[in-house]
Amino acid sequence: MMRLWAVPILLVLCGSAVATGLLRNERPGEAVALLVLFLLLAVTNSPLIFPRSIGAREAQRRSAEDGRPIVFWRPGCVFCLRLRVRLGRRARRMYWVDIWRDEEGAAVVRAANDGNETVPTVLIEGRPHVNPDPAWVREQLRRPA
């Protein structure tokens, strides 16, 4: 669990340190602006913005039943964040597997990417798509299962 929060905590600590230095130099406007920027970065890299992750085995079982896509992701990945933000509410129609929390999910991603853990990897109808265009993923979600 700590691994999920490592990047956001580090961002908050760095932002606090920079803001403290700026406050000591009597630059409160810059301190507030930078602290807000670091806090926003921390939130966007936290698990709070992504739908609840499930295990790869459970995601594959559910996907086989209802045909919904599976997204393999990891915290701190800007491409995963881009996909999540651009999907908006539609992201809840997919199963999300955090490869840092699920070794089976990481193995699926490595198998699809020549041994690399390249994310996001979206599994649609059993076929992996590495870092797909969010517009294309939205289109796939509109198609009947």
Image: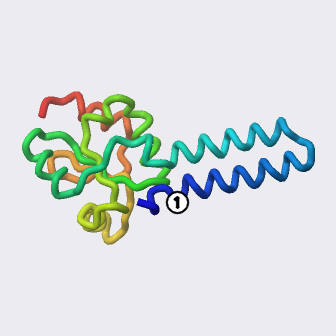
Foreground pick, 13 / 108: 13
Colouring chosen for the image of the structure: rainbow
Farthest-out residue, right: 26
Foreground pick, 128 / 44: 44
Farthest-out residue, bottom: 115
> Is 95 positioned to the left or the right of 34 in the image?
left
Foreground pick, 22 / 75: 22
Q: x%, y% of residue 6?
A: 52, 60
Q: x%, y% of residue 7?
A: 54, 57
Q: What amino acid type is highlighted by mark number 1? A: Ala
**Number of labelled discs?**
1
> Is 94 positioned to the left or the right of 64 in the image?
right
> Is 25 positioned to the left or the right of 110 in the image?
right
Residue at (80% x, 42% y) in the render = 31
Q: x%, y% of residue 25?
A: 92, 48
> Is 42 positioned to the left or the right of 67 in the image?
right
User: In the structure shown, which secondary structural element does the residue marked by tag 1 occupy?
Assistant: helix
Q: Which residue is mark 1?
A: 6
Q: x%, y% of residue 12?
A: 63, 51
Residue at (80% x, 50% y) in the render = 20
Residue at (76% x, 38% y) in the render = 32
Label 1 crowd bin: few (<14), some (14–19), many (20+), radius 10 Å: some
Tell me the quadrant of the picture where the N terminus can be found: bottom left
